[in-house]
Image (cartoon, helix red, strand yellow):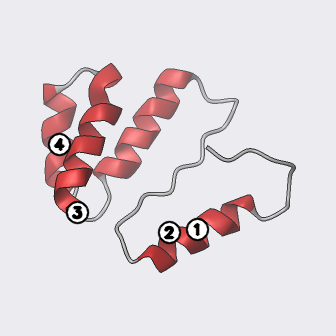
Amino acid sequence: MIKGRRRIGKTRLVQEFCARSGRPYVFFQATRSQPAPLARRALFDAVAGGQGMRDHGAALEHAAAPEDWLRTLAAVGARAVGP
């Protein structure tokens, strides 16, 4: 999580870091106006729709409770990327 004043380049910093890493990534920006369950769902959709994750995401949606999505997605992502 990155917090700070408005319009100082936080988003650009994260996007550049991710792009230069050479690793698969998902960029997700939550808003305060979005209720937590909808924000979690939007995050899940962003990760599950990422490159190489679509098959895992479809299976995950039916197999895991929403509270477990982040932990499960992290495990799937670790296997997909490797050491």
Q: Nearer the viewer, mark 2 or mark 4?
A: 2
C-alpha gap between disc 2 and disc 4: 25 Å
Q: Where is mark 1, residue-wise?
A: 15
Q: Which residue is at 36% across, 71% downward?
A: 23
Q: Quadrant of the N terminus?
A: top right
Look at the numbered discs 1 and 4 and tell me whether their residues touch, using CB distance below 8 Å.
Answer: no
Look at the numbered discs 2 and 1 and tell me whether their residues touch, using CB distance below 8 Å.
Answer: yes
**Which label belongs to residue 58?**
4
Q: Which residue is at 32% across, 59% downward?
A: 50
Q: Where is mark 2, residue-wise?
A: 18
Q: Which residue is at 27% across, 41% downward?
A: 73
Task: Compare residues 81 and 38 and report the one nearer the observer.
Answer: 81
Q: Where is mark 3, residue-wise?
A: 83
C-alpha gap between disc 3 and disc 4: 24 Å
Q: Nearer the viewer, mark 1 or mark 4?
A: 1
Above or below residue 70? Residue 53 is below
